[in-house]
Amino acid sequence: MMSEWKEILKDNVKPRFKKVVTNKKTGRKKTVRYGQAGKAKDGKDRIRPNTKKGDAYCARSMGIKRRLPKEKRNDPNSRNNLSRKKWKCRGEKSSL
């Protein structure tokens, strides 16, 4: 039952951005998808650095980052780090 829901959600919800990364050890390629798809209610972009919303996102994602193991925390190709880069996060604040 749970796997059916995962398949339904996987088909309907697609992240906005994607990046193809290559594993240096094995040479395998992997597509990393990240970011919320769509536009905000006012028609503008959802990602707005240097706003209260941006600061709130950066603070939340910093909490996620702290809980990760050290090797994943600094991985530039993780979904969290790629999203933080789009939001222009510096620590717990979003900047321009």
Image (cartoon, grey):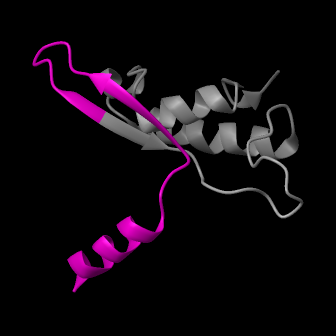
Name the one closer to the observer, 41 or 75: 41
Asked whether residue 42 is drawn in magenta, I would say no
Across and down, in percent, residue 45 comes to 78, 46
Quadrant, the C terminus: top right
Which residue occupies 70% across, 25% down? 88
Which residue occupies 44% across, 38% down? 79
Name the one closer to the observer, 10 or 88: 10
Question: As displayed, is residue 35 above or below residue 19?
Answer: below
In the rendered view, does 59 fall on the left or right side of 96?
A: left
Which residue occupies 74% across, 56% down? 39
Across and down, in percent, residue 46 comes to 75, 49
Quadrant, the N terminus: bottom left
Direction left: furthest residue:
26
Across and down, in percent, residue 95 comes to 80, 23
Across and down, in percent, residue 25 comes to 12, 14
Q: Which residues are magenta?
A: 1-30
Question: As displayed, is residue 92 above or below residue 96?
Answer: below
Direction top: furthest residue:
24
- Count of all numbered marks drawn on residues in the image: 0
Asked whether residue 26 is drawn in magenta, I would say yes
State which quadrant residue 22 falls in: top left
Name the one closer to the observer, 37 or 88: 37
